[in-house]
Each structure stands twice: as C-alpha cells, then as structure tokens.
Amino acid sequence: MRPLQIIILLSFSQIALKAQHQNNHWYFGHKAGLNFNSSSPTTVTSELSTLEGSAVISDPSGNLLFYTDGITVWNREHEIMTNGTGLMGGASSTQSALIVPLPNSYSKYYIFTTQDNNTNGGLHYSIVDMNLEEGNGDIEILTKNTLIIDKTSEKVTSVLHSNGVDIWVITHTLGSNEFLAYLLTSSGLNPTPVISSIGSFYSNNGYFGPIKATHSGLKIVAASTIDTLIEQFDFNKATGEMTNELDLNSLFIEDQFVYGIEFSPNDSLLYLSTSFVENLLYQVDIVSGQIITLNSNLQENAYGALQLGPDNKIFMARNAPGFVDIIHQPNQKGLDCQYEEAGINFPDGISSLFGLPSYCVYSFFLPNNQILGRDTTLCAGGSIELMIDISKDCAPITVTWHDGSADLIKTINQPGTYWVEIESMCGNLTDTIQVDFVPCLPIVHYDLEDCESYMSNGTNMDYSEFVPAYPAVLPCADVNATNVFRSPPQENKHSCTPGISESVAMCISSHPSCVYEMGHQSSLVIEIKINPQHDSMVMLTGLEFFEKAPAQYSWIDGGTGENNYPTKYGIRILKNETEIYQNEEINTSTDWSMQAFNFLSDTAFRVKDSSLFRIELLPYCPIGNGAQVSAWDIDEIRFYGGCVPLQSLNSDVTGNVITKAGTGIPRVEMQLSYSPAFINMITSLTDASGYYSFPQIESGSGYYLQGYKNDDVLNGVSAIDLILIQKHLLGITPFTSLHQYIAADVNHSGRVNVLDLVLLQKLLLGSIIELPGNTSWRFGYLPQDMSDQDLSAFKEVFNIDQLNQSSHIVDFVGIKIGDLNGDAKLGRRPVSRK
C-alpha cells in the first residue's frame, strides 16, 4: 500500500483564543465610557454623545478598534474614521448600531444601523476594513449605507449560528408581526431573511424598544415600548426560526413600558427595566415565571438600557445623571442579586443617558480543542504534514513546535506526541496530536490471472479459480480468505477481460437499478477470517483494487461490443455479521482506475478476537444506452493489514465531574498529560451533564489527570457563606467535612482563617474579581475520604501508572470556592454512558 499523506489546515476562525476582550470598551451617553481591561471597570471619556444606542469593538486583546452612534464612526485614536460620517442610524434609536465581525475574517466588520421614528425606519449596513488607513480602519465606500430592508423597528441583535462560525442578525419590521433573521457568512450577508411571523403586531409607530438573546442564543426577548409589548421566543440557531411565543406582560398586573432587557450570565434570570411611566427594575425567573421588583420606584431619572459587562455584572443606564447602576450578582435570585444605584459615578459634565453599547457574539474565538485534528494512525513508512495556514489578518505570528522549530509545515514520519504553540494578532493557542504507525502489509491478494469464462459445460460457475494468495504472513494472527464469488453463482455469472498491464481481469454484470441495494445478490463478495494470537491485535488497514466500466466491453476470447456500463458502485463491509462500513454512489470510470479505501482511523477494523469480515462490491445504475451487456471490470484486489504493537494500542479515559449532591458540572477543562507538571497536555471540556472523554489515548504509558475551572467566581457565593465561615472560626458551628474546608479556603493557603473571610467579603463587594492564589473551583478525584478535616488530604491529581487496553473511568467531585452551602447553579445530573 502506498504511504498515506494527510494535510491538516488550521483555521483561525475556529481556534481557542486565550484573549477574549472584544467588548472591553464601552462608549455611550454624553461622552461617557467604561474600560474593563483592569480588575474593575474604570471611567473614561470619548467623542460620542448620543441619547440612546451605540456600539464599540476591540481586538481580542482588549485594544480599542472603533466605535459609533450609528451616524458617525470614530477610530482607535478617537478621530472620525475615513468615510465615517453620515451613516443611517437614528439619533434617537434604541439600538442604533451593532458591530458584527465578518466570519473567518479578522479585519472586516459590518456596522448594522437602525433608523428612528424621525427617519422612517430601516436597517442598513456599512463595512469597515481595519487593514486600511494604517490600521485605523476605513469604511468601504461601495458598501456604505447598503439598505437591507426599509421600515424596521429600532431593534437589532445577533446570535451565533449553530455551526459556531456564521452569525444571525435579527430585527423586526413595522406594521407586522414579522421577525427577520439575516445570515452573515464569510461570503457576506444573505439578503433573503428567514421570516418568523409570530408574536404581536407591531404598529407603524412601534419603533421603540430593544431585542436581546440569551447568551446561549436559544431564547429571544423583544419589547415594543410604545405598544407595551414584551414577548419571549425560542430561537433555532441552525435555521433562524423563532417559535413558542410567551407573552411576558401576562406575568404583570399592568402593561409595562419595557426599555431595558438583559439576561443573567447563566441565562436563568431575565432583567427588565421600565421607563416613561414608572422607573422599575424587575427580575424574572425564566423557568418559574416568578417576578421580583428590585427597587421602590422612588428613584429619579428615567431607567434606560441594561447590558451585561465583561465582569459578569449587569449595568443600567440612567437618563441625565452622571452615573450608572449595577447588579453585582445577576445569577442570584431576589435581593441577593445586589442591585446598587449609582454603582459607578462619572466626572462632572458626563452623563449616561438612555443607552449602552450593543454587544455581539464573536465567532472567531470559539473553543476548538482539536486544532491539529484527531490523533491518527498511519501506515509504516508514511508521513503526515501538519500545515499551519495563517490568515494574513493575524500576522505577525510566532510558531513554536515540540522540537523548538518554527516551521509553518511540519512533516511527521515517526510515532509520538507532537505539539505546537502559536502567538498571533488573533490570540494565542496550543494543541497536541498523537501519531502512531502500523505495518500496512498485503495480507490477501487476488490477481485474477486464472479467470476462466468458458461455461458451456457448467464449469467455473463457482468462481473456484479465484484462489487467494497471502503475500505477507502475519506473525501475530492466522488469516484465511475465501474465493471471490457471487451467490448464487449460476445466476450471477462472471466473464474474463483484458486487465491492467496486459494481465487478465474479471468482469461481472451490473445491478440494473439506480438505487443502491445493500446485500444484493449481484454483489461481488470476499470473506476474510482473522484469528489473532493471544494478547495480540491485528488491524485491517485498507483495501485496493482496479475498476473499469468500459464503453465497449471486451472478452478475453476477442468478443467486443457496446456496453451498457454501470455508472456507480457501492461497497459494504460487515464484521461478524454487523455492518461497520458503507459507501455508496461511488462513480465508476471508463478507464482503469485505482480505488483505495483507508481504515486506519476506524477502530471497528481492529481485531483482538477471531473475526469474520465480509466485503461486498455492487456495480449498479447502467448508463441506459440499450446494449444487452452491462459489464463491470475488476482487477488486482489487495487487502492490507498488520500487527499492532501492544504498547501502541489505544484506550479511552472518561468520567463524570459532579458536585457533592451528584449534579454534573459543565465546562470543566479536564487536563491529561504525561507530566505531573502538565506540560504539553491535552484537554477535554465536560458537557452539560459533567461528562468528559479522552478517546483513543495511547496505552502503555503513564498519565496525570486533573480538572480546571476558573470562571463565574461569584456563582453560589452570598452573605450566607460569610456567616458560615464566621460560625466556624468562632467555634459555634465547626466544619465537619473536607467539602466545607476546601470551599472556605478562599486563598488556597491550606487552612481556614480570617483572611479567607476578608477576601470573600471583598469578592462580594466587587473590590476584587478573582481569588488570589486560587481558582474558582477545585476538583478531587473519586473515591476519596471527604470526612477528613486535613486540607492537605484532598487529592486533586489522578495518576494512571500505566494505561492498559481497557477503558479507564475516573470521576471527580467539584467544590466551588466560597460556596459553603452548595447553592451554585450548574448543569444536570450526569447520565450513564457506556
């Protein structure tokens, strides 16, 4: 078998970036601004002055790129961008602008604008190219103010497509009940929207009010302030459709003039602000529908937009004053969410007014833990090329491979674990790939030279002349194959034809249907039995043969004529009577063509116990020229395989990460490494039920396994936890389990003292946003004794001395730091997996 060569391209549209700070600059109101690049937001100023909506974009490292009020665009120098005036956003539009990156581009951005009630409504876009004007950006003049649709409301938002790359841009028209979802791909904006006729009718005056999606993108809430409408819908991220209308006004005693909408970071709670009639701030439990009013309606100055910040706090704009309000703990129900009026004050002369910047999802920083592709097995003597294909928009870049080299193409021809680190303008990333090699030897061969087609006396109908040869004898297994045959042979005869290189080949008749029928008796069949020796494994690595569907048939005895040749063929492979491979509608060729099938990456072709493989080849769907003969020629059939060294056999490492109560913890980064220092590790994120998996890990080596999660630091943390620590320190109610001690050890010092209490207080007050010396979660492997009170007894790194060929199941318990009473919001109970 010829050496296999694989090319793997790295797409920066789907890589894991360490820096995700595109929303770290806010500009809004009258010259107001916030910078989230420090531990807590700091006040800044800008050139923007607008009553309502705005939009801002930074690069992945948090450096400002540009901002707009929907009419004027300012660059990173706070200067008006070239061609950056006269955009069609309304001066008084709720969501006057939305900045969306062009998928698979680091340099181009769409600015979507909505007009207000003074300019007749409408959605436009303009494209900014950051490669222009020496990196300060320029609006492409040919795209400026491209009309998408006229007469829309003042609302626009975005949701990431289910493919993780493309983006939906969503608005609502006036004088209708239609939501429009436009798909933005790397090719540009599709001008034909997905229309969802659902919900209430928006009047021709129903301009005001925002639209917001949950952070998962699965639900959308929209408000028409003048029409006193507030409705929730389900959103299909794959199709762009909105379904399942829910009238949120039905939860209130009176109709509400909703102006601000935002969801808690975990999407469990909805926050609504009202204006014009009353200034009220509501919290709605999305599941139960329970509503809590967070203020007394005594505050002056109208309530404005709500927006989640990069620090996972929700901010609320206020019309006229020099401050914004803050919800410090938006994942917590009721007053525990810690709503604070005037949480941030601005210098004199600066006002927040009604609006806050629109947010956008950014497809180019979604996580992808398989940058180099899946671990792979190749034929001995082959190679794999790992090619880093970097967009010019991300330059300059720095590449560091496992051996210290900096090549953009790395050729691998030896087994091992290989890793690469990349630093670029688009962010930093690292990935690891395991490459194994096995012998790909010709273990069964049919040259078909003995083909005989004179059947007038009834001989050779059983295909008995096609005796297999065994060019390579495997030291680890016995291999036995049948003759090539069709069954029953009396009804499915064969003939002989000139083969490749002046050899002899076989030809068979085709199945007349153009629908592939697996297992049909017209199929050419080969059966191979592989019986490995004890403690051995064999891999059936590939199949090769030559095929030809000639326009003119040709018999070995000289007969020839027009051929009603098959246009397709299909292949099906069964292992111990169970189908493991099928490929149909393969096009045939009118000249001899090599057909090769590679099974190296398919574990179903690995054999540890005696197994029978059945291979079926079916030519079908004749061209339809009326000829009586419908022949398909085949020659030189070879099967490849080899013994797999036991130390190279792969195994799985799986498990569940759960809380003390048994609830699965999602998005835990499980880390697996050869080294206890976790150098060159591979990672796997737990799913919604807390399940993780490292498939096909090389056996025979030792590994270290641990969990890591350092986000949502305030999840489950409240004043109750402070009281519990105080009671422990005073000896009133001492801790009784290791769970409590670990949760209370806020600074990871190995003991619980007053300093942990002080740090937790600072965390709740917002004066710190991270735990010094600690992560927000710690994970210990199971089983272990959690009744111990010695913090050093908590075992967090699981060591697999030598990974054997069976699957390893390692479960972990997660402890949320600072959450003494265990009320953190998580996933669901883990499900059983086999």
Image (cartoon, rainbow, N blue to C red):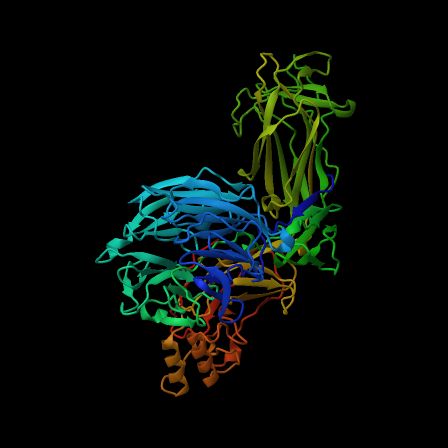
Residue 526 on image: x %, y %: 62, 31
Q: Residue furthest left?
A: 253
Q: Residue at x 44, y 63 (%)?
A: 30
Q: Residue furthest right?
A: 502
Relative depth, front residue between 220 and 399: 220
The relative height of residue 697 versus residue 488 in the rendered view (above or below) is below
Q: Is residue 372 visible?
A: no
Relative depth, front residue between 120 and 521: 120
Q: Residue furthest bottom?
A: 730
How many numbered circles are shown? 0
Q: Is residue 85 visible?
A: yes
Quadrant housing residue 640: top right
Q: Is residue 741 left or right of residue 644?
A: left
Relative depth, front residue between 8 and 520: 8
Residue 609 on image: x %, y %: 60, 47
Residue 614 on image: x %, y %: 59, 35
Quadrant housing residue 491: top right
Residue 236 on image: x %, y %: 41, 46
Q: Quadrant of the N terminus?
A: top right
The relative height of residue 89 versus residue 748 in the rendered view (above or below) is above
Q: Is residue 404 left or right of residue 573?
A: right
Q: Residue at x 70, y 58 (%)?
A: 398
Quadrant housing residue 822: bottom left
